[in-house]
Amino acid sequence: MNEFVEAVMDVSDSEETITYTRIDNGLLSKIPEENRSKIERHLLWILRDHHIRFFRMSSFPYKDLTDYLESAGRGLFFAFCPYCNRTYLLSAGTSKARVNKNPSVCVYCADMGPYWKFTSSMTKVGKLTSLLDHFEARGQGKKRELGRVILEQSLVMIATVIEVFLRDIYAITLNMRYVKPGTSLVRRFYDDSRNDFANIGKAKAAFKKDLDIDLNKMLSKESRVLLEVLMAKRNTIVHNNGFVDETFIRQTGSSAVKVRIRKLGQAPELKEQVPVSRDELDLYLRMAEELFLVLGRKFRKEFENIVIDKLIAFVEEHEVTRRYV
Ligand SMILES: [Zn+2]
């Protein structure tokens, strides 16, 4: 699957995007010496071919790749989508009049990547909790009820964002490492791990066994415990209307978790409503941020190494196509 995608849109260079890597001197300098000039030549050939066909031009006015990158007025990106496992080139001009989509999402499968999903969902959590100013949790009657609903739903959202982030990183890392280019098993990895990732113990075990990533070593002790408390409370809210059941007692059975719950305030007994406070949500948000930073950084490093190999393979396949077609 080697494609050239012409886009008239803005392309973000934001840290939150993953699919698009800008082709510039920084990226080219990471390509091993023995491949670099060949890669540059072939990229230029692809661009020339495309330029003449797409713009119906009779000639290609750029003398080399650097000249193209500096003069064409179009950003050139190598796209590798870890979700659909496709690689392609994207040339993006910026015409404000036609900007209506953010190309930070893959042009084929529209996935926006783990980072952007995480940060935009957390922004929504912030908006939701800001409603608590209007429905004070400690107010009376209806206000108190609404406050409780917002607290519960914010907690569920934070837990879901973490769950989605972990499953995304898990599925795309497997896809990226082991699946043949151009085919994707992300859905399969995602669906197979559906039940595991609501249970943080199983999620950690899957990371360790399948990816050799030890989440326990990456997180501080405080964050590890908070993650367990959060997931146990989330399950109670979603599955038992927020009332402590045997599952909650079992999931929060370790002494570190028990101590943490007591520190958060009231420790609930069987059949009592599980307590949730705004201060507690802030602690979960900080823990989520820590997880996002350490695991996100680890994934990005692996991704950036793979991108270079993908770019080399992409250009080589083009060469073969050129020779035989
Ligand atoms: Zn894709």
Image: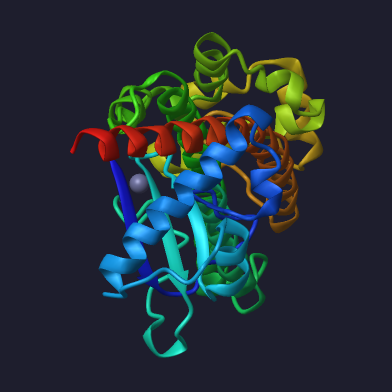
Placement of 64 over or under 136, stated as above or below: above
- Picture quarter with the C terminus: top left
Rendered residue at 54%/13% (across/down): 205
Q: Is residue 175 left or right of residue 325?
A: right
Rendered residue at 62%/31% (across/down): 305
Q: Position of residue 114 (x, y in %)?
A: 52, 46
User: Is residue 243 among what the camera can see?
Assistant: no
Placement of 179 over or under 118, stated as above or below: above
- In the picture as drawn, the residue positioned furthest to the top comes out as 209
Rendered residue at 66%/17% (across/down): 214
Picture quadrant of residue 314: top left
Rendered residue at 55%/18% (across/down): 207
Front-lying residue, 120 or 278: 120
- In the picture as drawn, the residue positioned furthest to the bottom comes out as 97
Picture quadrant of residue 58: bottom left
Front-lying residue, 283 or 54: 54
User: Is residue 200 among what the camera can see?
Assistant: yes
